[in-house]
């Protein structure tokens, strides 16, 4: 009986979201007026082209060190996760957490 209620509510939500997605034509983006679009601000005409890059060797080295730390942290976390999974598998094989005890 409880399953039927959950199924009906899930079906209702699915139909509601599908209808609202396909039927409603709501535009959440801002509309730019054509006149404003044709005007080019003075600052954009005279602006320098900015190239994203490190300013000196110290910043360049800092970026590589940061990336190395990120990858080391990822590998350490994966290693710890593998150890945890192995321990849970070992406990499962011993039936340590089973409901029926010997």
Image (cartoon, rainbow, N blue to C red):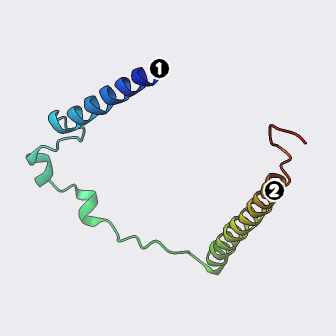
Which residue lies at the image location 18% right of the left edge and 39% below the top edge?
Answer: 22
Given contact means CB atoms under 8 Å apart, are the residues at marks 1 and 2 in contact? no
- Please state, as top left, top right, bottom left or bottom right, where the C terminus lies in the image: top right
Rendered view: 9 above or below 36:
above
Marks 1/2: CA–CA distance: 35 Å
Q: Position of residue 21 (x, y in %)?
A: 23, 37
Which residue lies at the image location 50% right of the left edge and 75% below the top edge?
Answer: 53
- Disc 2 residue crowd, few under 14, some 14–19, many 20+, Cα 10 Å: few
Q: Position of residue 62 (x, y in %)?
A: 67, 73
- Mark sitting on residue 65: none
Which residue lies at the image location 15% right of the left edge and 34% below the top edge?
Answer: 23
Q: Position of residue 32 (x, y in %)?
A: 16, 44
- Mark sitting on residue 2: 1
Which residue lies at the image location 45% right of the left edge and 25% below the top edge?
Answer: 3
Q: Residue furthest bottom?
A: 57
Rendered view: 88 above or below 2:
below
In this rendering, the count of numbered labels is 2
Nearer-the-camera pick, 4 or 55? 4
Q: Residue furthest left?
A: 35
1 or 2: tag closer to the N-terminus? 1
Residue denoted by label 2: 93
Q: Position of residue 97 (x, y in %)?
A: 82, 43
Helix, strand, or loop for circle 2? helix
Which quarter of the picture shows residue 33?
Answer: top left
- Disc 1 residue crowd, few under 14, some 14–19, many 20+, Cα 10 Å: few
Helix, strand, or loop for circle 1? helix
Which quarter of the picture shows residue 74?
Answer: bottom right
Which quarter of the picture shows residue 7?
Answer: top left
User: Along the horizontal axis of the image, is 11 left or right of 84?
Assistant: left
Nearer-the-camera pick, 71 or 50? 71
Rendered view: 72 above or below 98:
below
User: Along the horizontal axis of the image, is 37 left or right of 9?
Assistant: left
């Amino acid at each position: 009986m409880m399953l039927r209620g959950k199924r009906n509510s899930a079906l209702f939500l699915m139909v509601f979201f599908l209808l609202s997605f396909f039927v409603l034509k709501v535009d959440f983006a801002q509309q730019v007026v054509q006149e404003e679009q044709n005007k080019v601000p003075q600052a954009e005409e005279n602006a320098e082209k900015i190239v994203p890059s490190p300013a000196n060797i110290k910043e360049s080295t800092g970026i590589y060190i940061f990336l190395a730390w990120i990858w080391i942290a990822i590998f350490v976390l994966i290693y710890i996760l593998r150890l945890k999974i192995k321990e849970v598998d070992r406990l499962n094989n011993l039936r340590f957490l089973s409901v029926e005890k010997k």
